[in-house]
Image (spheres, grey):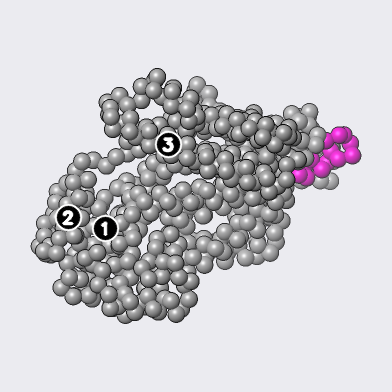
Amino acid sequence: MTESISFPTQGELVTYAFKIFGLLPTKYDRDSDFRDKAKTFQKLLSRLKDEEGQLTKNFEKALKTFDERLSKHIDDQQTRFVIQGVLANLYREYNQTLIEEGTNRSKIDTLLYFLSTRAISTLVEAVTFQSLLRHRLSGEDLVPHLDMFLVDTTDEGEPTWPLTKVIRWIYSEMNCSQVQFHAPRRSQAAENPALEQNLENAGNWVRDQAFPSLPSLLANFQSSLALHEGDREIPKSLTTSMVLSLTLARVSTAVFKDIQRVYGERSLKKMTECVRLYFTAIADEVKEFKGEIRQQCKQDDLTQLPTAVWESACGHYFQFFQSKNQEALVTLQRLCSADPDNPFKPIVIQTLAHKLGRYQVITRMDQMVFSAAWFPSDGFQDLLDLGFRLKNDPQTSEADVDRFEQKLSAAGMTEQLAWLGPWLRAVCLYRTERFADAFEYSEKAYALGKYRAGRNQYLLVNLYMELCAKNNRRLKFKKALDWANYAGIKVRWIRSEEQTQETIDVAFEFFRVANYVTH
């Protein structure tokens, strides 16, 4: 039950990335070698989700496999770099949130908090700047195509998914109907039933009666498009963008469907509007940047700039952009402190947006408003503060811990702070040098604190590893180190060291003889 309160595990996020891209093996897969290894890879993902085995090694294998799988379907390396860059930015933001912020809510609610406060703005910035760096897009280049990858919802709540939009766009570009595109020679269906199957599958996808894997989706449209070669002129824009458009539509449709299923129509609509607003606002930023570069370099066609010059300009601009984000956040926080009841007066916000940019102000305002709605109750904060006062007090006894856990139970906070009681008891036992008993409670606190204790995870992990050493539990010591590396949490004595067996042994010995519990 207690496991329901946490951030999603990193293994769950990696598995989800394979799911939304549709990169798990199917019978349509071009990569027959991967099909043969499908069960092994599925087992690897399962172990990663359950945090079993060598986490860091399995994580790296999964990322490598993702890149290999994606390259089977998207030939353009620059496009793959953009996609991978966006995913890397989202992962870093998640990881930073995980190790800085705790949670007292369910995994589903915690994910909603991350989506609302961090993920959407990170996605918009990552897509914009990764595309800008790789393809030198202008701010206005992305916006006209944006609606094709967002869900439309009627007043009655009926959605039109991005995949449906892109498929219809392909038919429009080819100036033909669905039947004409997939089965132009229907009379030959008896000799080639694949034509009818492609037509039937596409119809199901458009009507949202089925959802394809990426290999089956691309195989259908590539084979159907090939039927028209030699008979008519195929728009160049279609041949160059069809694969990417179908891929992105498949991804966005999968994500939006999950948002609708888990959080409902209202959240789906709100997030869609948020994405649209953020992309429109950031386009103004990029347009201004491109104008300044044209003026400074006296070059209208920025594709003619040397790569080194362009990359340097993008790097400096991104730093400037991030500094404006930070200044907007600090200024808005100061406004809240000065007037908590009415901090965001229209005239003040308008002036700030004029100075720093509309994107910076609206995204940081949204972040603050969303975060405020998720603040823990006063009762939760009071008990958390009490727990840390007890932890830091050398006079705290096990009887004090008993009374603290009784208070948690009376306040209905046992689930939310499940990791704190065992931690306090481990510290008490440690101070009396009952290291074997302290190890058992620290192991429980470590397990329960994962993905929920925020910045406190650093002390939890280090105490647990110290007690592993004091009890000569080398295997569990190494497993805890592996998880710390996997989660991005530093460990004493080997923070910046290359993690050879020798450095791990040295750290184990230091932990065995050291005393950090009062630190």
Q: Relative to 518, say whether 97 is above or below.
A: above
Q: Please, what secondary structure does the residue beneath circle 2 have?
A: helix
* Residue 419 sits inside the magenta stretch: no
- Where is residue 438 shown, x and y percent of the image? 22, 71
* Residue 228 sits inside the magenta stretch: yes
Callout 1 crowding tier (Cα within 10 Å): few <14, some 14–19, many ≥20: many
For residue 402, what is the image quadrant?
bottom left
Find the magenta span and give its range: 222-234
Q: Which residue is mark 3?
A: 327
* Mark whose residue sits in front, 1 or 2: 2
The answer to whether 77 appears left or right of 2 in the picture is: right
Residue in front for this viewpoint, 326 or 67 = 326
Q: CA distance from mark 2 to mark 3?
A: 34 Å
Callout 2 crowding tier (Cα within 10 Å): few <14, some 14–19, many ≥20: few
Tell me which numbered mark, 2 or 3, is placed earlier along the sequence: 3
Q: Which residue is mark 2?
A: 389
Q: Which residue is mark 1?
A: 419
